[in-house]
Image (tube, helix red, strand yellow):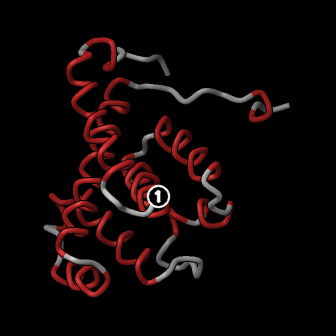
């Protein structure tokens, strides 16, 4: 697959605006890094963004999240490694990422409300919107993840 364009050099102003929100979410929002990783990975799975999946899985590993925790995100409904808080965020990420199909069900909101304050729900929802922006830029540009030598077939 060939990259169509580089959205970051094509419009530095756009990149900087998205990056500013990214900095706020990851460094200043007070959200736990594990939840931010969960959101980034789950939305990237849904959106089929290999560039973001590769990058965020590496970041999650660097922050000490287990291989099992990272690997089972696509099948989170059946996986036993996620806490009730994480499950609420996963369902919310699914619903918000797929907003046109889901209309963000009340049941998903109630699960969030049981675990988080309105302020936290707002920040989590902004984090979901943010990764969806990154995913849409990367997928539409056909950005490709780097291929590690150890990943190549023998």
- Point 31% across, 33% down: residue: 19
Farthest right residue? 154
The percent position of residue 32, horizontal first and vertical second, equals: 43, 63
Q: Which residue is mark 1?
A: 33
- Point 56% across, 40% down: residue: 54
Query: How many labels, in total?
Result: 1
The percent position of residue 23, horizontal first and vertical second, equals: 34, 40
In this view of the protein, which residue sits in the foreground, 45 or 129?
Answer: 129
SS for dot 1: helix
Q: Is residue 126 above or below residue 4?
A: below
The reply, left or right, for residue 35 in relation to residue 122 is right
The reply, left or right, for residue 33 in relation to residue 79 is left
Question: Where is the C terminus found, in terms of image quarters?
Answer: top right
In this view of the protein, which residue sits in the foreground, 60 or 92?
Answer: 60
In this view of the protein, which residue sits in the foreground, 112 or 104?
Answer: 112
The reply, left or right, for residue 43 in relation to residue 63 is left
Q: For residue 145, which quarter of the picture?
A: top right
The percent position of residue 66, horizontal first and vertical second, equals: 67, 63
Q: For residue 126, which quarter of the picture?
A: bottom left
The reply, left or right, for residue 61 in relation to residue 107 is right
Dot 1, crowdedness within 10 Å: few (<14), some or many (≥20)?
some
The percent position of residue 81, horizontal first and vertical second, equals: 59, 77
- Point 25% across, 41% down: residue: 21
Q: Is residue 61 above or below residue 141?
A: below
In this view of the protein, which residue sits in the foreground, 27 or 21?
Answer: 27
- Point 41% across, 52% down: residue: 40
């Amino acid at each position: 697959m060939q990259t169509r364009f580089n959205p970051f050099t094509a419009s530095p102003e756009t990149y900087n605006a998205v990056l500013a929100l990214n900095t706020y979410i990851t460094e200043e929002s007070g959200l736990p890094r594990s939840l931010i990783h969960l959101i980034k990975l789950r939305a990237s799975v849904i959106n089929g963004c290999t560039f973001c999946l590769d990058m965020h899985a590496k970041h999650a590993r660097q922050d000490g999240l287990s291989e099992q925790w990272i690997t089972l995100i696509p099948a989170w409904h059946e996986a036993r490694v996620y806490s009730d808080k994480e499950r609420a965020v996963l369902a919310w990420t699914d619903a918000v990422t797929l907003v046109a199909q889901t209309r963000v069900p009340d049941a998903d909101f109630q699960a969030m409300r049981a675990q988080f304050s309105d302020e936290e729900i707002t920040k989590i929802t902004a984090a979901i919107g943010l990764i969806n922006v990154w995913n849409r830029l990367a997928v539409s540009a056909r950005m490709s993840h780097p291929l590690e030598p150890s990943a190549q077939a023998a």
